[in-house]
């Protein structure tokens, strides 16, 4: 099945059902289907052809949903880019994927202009909310929602590319991840299955729709005919949660930074969201202390810890009934997929040993855009396991088959000859009263190799460095106890909300 067929199915089943709530606007499935049809016809009229790339540079607005499905209906490949990106980052994506069109908003037109400066070939810019001067180089998104006589292409192959999405570049230059219609259809079906999503769900997402975790909130909602409430960000958590209460939200996706903000809200009482059915977490594992805090705040709500990456959307989830016994685990492979933990030679490790996580299934990327060398590293045959596997670069261990994240392979530090995973230290720090967030980095030392340095955001100004170190010393081996603690007002983040470890030092 092609991704746009998900919308066609839900629109046919209940065209009056609310599909998107954003910025005070409410779009029904019938309206979303009709608007994306009109946009697709206008894109075809502008000579967008099958396989062409179209950048979607938009905030969490209803126009973004119309844009994504309009591009797909035109037979093209949508390329989501976070508007928080700088002009240089946008230029990198433009030069890499060579888009035919950029669909954006008036507020981002200046950045588009800066990114396109001096380029020999420039795409068409279609902007929502822009005052379009006669003869200008910017076209109106609103005008493209009017009827067009262009015929939509016949596209029936799930093997076509649907999306080209770029990684955050946290470990080097961003890479374009190629995802097929079939892969995205499978992933959205698997996620909907284990979350138990139905047309009765109302999901609120403040996650950028330009990142995989946020994007799949849209795809899963459209798949089952649910309602998606879009918030532009989580900067004002009290206002977001009030919207969740008013809209009777049943699903709330979070990342650890958002969970930390929720748990720091002193006026929030248990049961504040009576319609809430489930909470999810991805992007990075939740510290066990956050898991316990969310369980107290949302009693009876199912909490799903999940693991995924851009190259496969999702890989594993922990059933909520297991979270009490395994608060640090991200569970097992999601339905229809496989995972394995291997050593550096590609051999499966024994239970409890640490190794690299491999993922196999129909949801894997097709490869990296125009980067065969990086593709060969990430997607490899494994004779012992059979077939092609995605090498995640993440270190895990498995106990009774349940996966526990240890850290990025590149993050592991050598301290006095022993390997230390910063994530294990951070989990203990998050359990310390007075700490809202923490990250651990290594500072080079000629004798020890590295000395551990903790950077902490505290919610209790009375907390001291000595108290933090005493807390760690009582719970960790000496080699894992930070030798210094630094307090900061906030931690640097990537555009997707993850703590940018490389920017902490």
Image: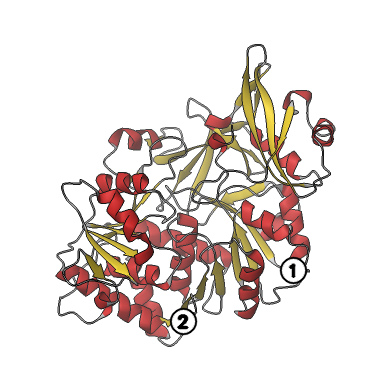
User: In the shown orientation, is residue 376 left or right of residue 95?
Assistant: right
> How far across and how far down the image is residue 196, in percent?
57, 69
In the rendered view, tell whether residue 106 sits above or below residue 454.
below
Local crowd size for mark 2, using a 10 Å CA cut-off: few (<14), some (14–19), many (≥20): some
The one nearer the camera, 33 or 244, is 244
Image quarter of the C terminus: top right
Sooner in the amino-acid sequence: mark 2 or mark 1: 2
Q: Alpha carbon of mark 2 to alpha carbon of mark 1: how far? A: 30 Å
Local crowd size for mark 1, using a 10 Å CA cut-off: few (<14), some (14–19), many (≥20): few
Q: Quadrant of residue 10?
A: bottom left
Pointer 2 residue:
26
In contact (CB < 8 Å): disc 2 and disc 1: no
> How far across and how far down the image is residue 266, in percent?
78, 62
- Label 2 vs label 1, nearer the camera: 2
In the rendered view, tell whether residue 222 sits above or below residue 485.
below
User: In the shown orientation, is residue 245 left or right of residue 51?
Assistant: right
Hey, which residue is sitting farthest bottom in the picture? 16
- Say the numbered circle drawn on residue 334: none
Pointer 1 residue:
300
**Residue drawn 62% across and 49% down?**
330
Q: Quadrant of residue 66?
A: bottom left
Question: Is residue 74 in view from this perspective?
Answer: no
The one nearer the camera, 477 or 493, is 493
**Residue drawn 63% across and 52% down?**
256
């Amino acid at each position: 099945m092609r991704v746009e067929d998900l919308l066609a199915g839900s629109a046919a089943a209940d065209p009056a059902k609310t599909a998107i709530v954003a910025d005070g606007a409410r779009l029904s499935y019938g309206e979303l289907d009709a608007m994306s049809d009109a946009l697709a016809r206008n894109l075809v009229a502008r000579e967008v052809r099958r396989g062409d790339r179209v950048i979607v540079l938009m905030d969490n607005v209803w126009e973004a949903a119309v844009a994504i499905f309009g591009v797909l209906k035109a037979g093209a490949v949508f390329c989501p880019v976070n508007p928080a990106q700088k002009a240089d980052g946008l230029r990198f994506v433009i030069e890499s994927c060579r888009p035919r069109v950029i669909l954006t908003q008036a507020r981002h037109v200046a950045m588009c202009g800066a990114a396109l400066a001096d380029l020999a070939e420039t795409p068409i810019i279609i902007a929502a909310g822009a005052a379009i001067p006669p003869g200008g180089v910017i076209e109106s998104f609103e005008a493209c929602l009017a009827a067009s006589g262009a015929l939509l292409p016949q596209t029936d192959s799930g093997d076509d590319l649907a999306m080209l999405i770029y990684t955050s570049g946290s470990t080097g230059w961003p890479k374009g991840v190629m995802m097929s219609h079939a892969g995205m259809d499978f992933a959205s079906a698997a996620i909907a299955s284990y979350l138990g999503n139905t047309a009765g769900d109302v999901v609120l997402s403040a996650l950028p729709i330009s990142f995989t975790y946020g994007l799949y909130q849209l795809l899963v909602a459209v798949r089952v005919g649910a309602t998606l409430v879009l918030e532009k960000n989580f900067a004002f958590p009290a206002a977001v949660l009030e919207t969740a209460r008013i809209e009777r939200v049943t699903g709330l996706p979070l990342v650890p930074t958002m969970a930390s903000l929720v748990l720091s809200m002193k006026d929030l009482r248990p049961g504040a969201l009576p319609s809430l059915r489930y909470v999810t977490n991805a992007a990075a594992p939740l510290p066990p202390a956050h898991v316990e805090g969310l369980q107290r705040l949302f009693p009876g709500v199912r909490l799903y810890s999940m693991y995924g990456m851009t190259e496969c959307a999702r890989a594993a989830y922990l059933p909520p009934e297991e979270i009490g016994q395994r608060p640090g685990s991200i569970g097992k492979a999601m339905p229809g997929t496989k995972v394995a933990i291997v050593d550096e030679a590609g051999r499966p490790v024994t239970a409890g040993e640490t190794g690299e996580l491999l993922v196999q299934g129909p949801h894997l990327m097709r490869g990296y855009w125009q980067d065969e060398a990086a593709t060969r590293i990430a997607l490899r045959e494994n004779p012992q396991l059979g077939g092609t596997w995605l090498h995640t670069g993440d270190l895990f261990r498995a106990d009774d088959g349940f996966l526990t994240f240890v850290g990025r392979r590149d993050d592991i530090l050598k301290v006095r000859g022993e390997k230390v995973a910063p994530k294990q230290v951070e989990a203990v720090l998050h359990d310390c009263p007075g700490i809202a967030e923490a990250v651990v980095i290594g500072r080079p030392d000629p004798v020890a190799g590295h000395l551990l340095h903790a950077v902490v955001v505290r919610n209790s100004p009375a907390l001291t460095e000595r108290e933090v170190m005493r807390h760690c010393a009582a719970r960790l081996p000496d080699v894992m106890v930070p030798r210094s603690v630094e307090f900061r007002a906030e931690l640097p983040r990537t555009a997707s909300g993850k703590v940018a470890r490389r920017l902490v030092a």
